[in-house]
Image (spheres, rainbow, N blue to C red):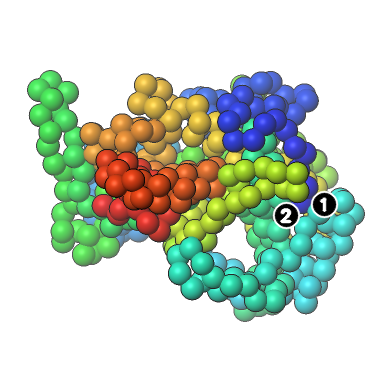
Amino acid sequence: MSGRGIGGFGSQTNMNVPEGFAQDAFTWKNMARLIVDGLANSWFTDLPLVGVSDSLSSAEKSEMKLIQELKPEFLGEDETLILENSYRSYSDFGEQIPIDESPLGQKLIRVLERLALSWSFREERVEVTPVSGFLLPSLKLEGSGQWLTYFGMPFDQVFKIFRDVSGKERILWSSDILAATRPFEHVTVMFARASDTGERFRIQNDAQAIKNGGLTLGQLGLRINLPVILKWLMYLAETPFPSNILSFSRPIAFGEKFPKESLPIPYFINKKNSRVAGAYEQHSQGFNGSAALMPNVIEAGWILENMSDDDLATCLTIASNGLTRMMTILEDGYINHNTSESSICWDVVLGSAVTLDSDCEFGKEALGLSTWIPVSRIGLKLNSTYRDAPDALRLNNFESLESISLNGAGPYVANC
């Protein structure tokens, strides 16, 4: 899908917002406004909302007291609501099938052509090492195209078809939006400093609770923060009025005549050891990119069921524009609020693993702990690691090697 190129590549810190929207409409700051949570709840009245803690299993809540102490902003007296069952896995949808052999897939292709959206089938990649592999002829299981964020950075939007045991088919329309720089779900220890004495102290998961399936400290951001943030992002992705302070519900975006039973369902998947790619350089023919298997990748998008061509065209327009908005908001948070000084610090809002050590300096010093990177920016991070590490090794610059190991991304960095 061909997005409209907006702005410079890589170094641009100010976005070019589409005509008709306020300059701050798709910013991290707008997303983090207190009012957005209530607006998002009003927006998704057609979908079940549950408290964050209610989305956890009994086993995951083994250390609920510790979780509440560490996440009071979401688990206080007025517990934050999230979209029920928004955290999914591919197995929920049945079997993935070739797009061109599916009646719903054929309809999707027809509507894409009608909308003049450019796309192609993805080739199948077989991984040999974390940074190398080879391509096989496409089985036509995925279609994809490239869009640009409002910062001018390219990212892929992808569609897949699944068929469940009853024969019902569904479209998953999505993007990989976040990639973790290293594994984090295993982390069971955090370090903090007392505000009065500055003394460093240790907090640790109860070993038996973890054996029973309790959430690790490393998983708290994934299971508590991200579902909330994704609700906010999905609201801002869909609403025609991202800067408004008035409550509306979803039919205002899709149209009053749009069948309510066909409204798309937001979802996200935490993919393990998944390959992502991103651009680090632009040239006359397009972009150069870097890629790697990353330990955790968040895929986010919408589930679309069978509907008329006109209704599907409406959904695809909203979803494709919506993913562009979401990726832009994440980019803004990463490049403009990735410091300890920000009141809406990137890592703190997302609950990244770097928040588990008070000695980490957000945006600068990760100490070998994981942080999230918008996938539209992952190519820049990977390329800098691949470029700088050999240079430091050749020059025996061990200080630089240590910094790259602790703060870089990709298969050659340290995992703590």
Dot 2 crowding, Cα within 10 Å, few <14, some 14–19, many 20+:
some
Is residue 51 placed above or below 200 in the rendered structure?
Answer: below
Q: Mark 1 = which residue?
A: 117
Q: Residue at x 30, y 43 (%)?
A: 397
Name the side, left or right, on which 11 lies relative to 369. right
Amino acid on which disc 2 is placed: Gly
Helix, strand or loop at disc 2? strand
Residue 109 vs residue 64, the one in the foreground: 109
Name the mark on residue 355.
none
Q: Are marks 2 and 1 in contact (CB under 8 Å)?
A: yes
Residue 140, image x, y percentages: 72, 72
Amino acid on which disc 1 is placed: Leu
Name the side, left or right, on which 64 lies relative to 323. left
Can the viewer see residue 170? no
Q: Residue at x 54, y 37 (%)?
A: 330
Q: Quadrant of residue 62?
A: bottom left
Q: Residue at x 55, y 53 (%)?
A: 290
Q: Quadrant of residue 308?
A: bottom right
Helix, strand or loop at disc 1? loop
Residue 84, image x, y percentages: 50, 51
Q: In 3D space, how far apart are the residues under numbered discs 2 and 1 (Cα atoms)?
A: 8 Å
Residue 90 vs residue 400, the one in the foreground: 400
Residue 346 vs residue 389, the one in the foreground: 389
Q: Residue at x 67, y 53 (%)?
A: 157
Q: Mark 2 = which residue?
A: 145
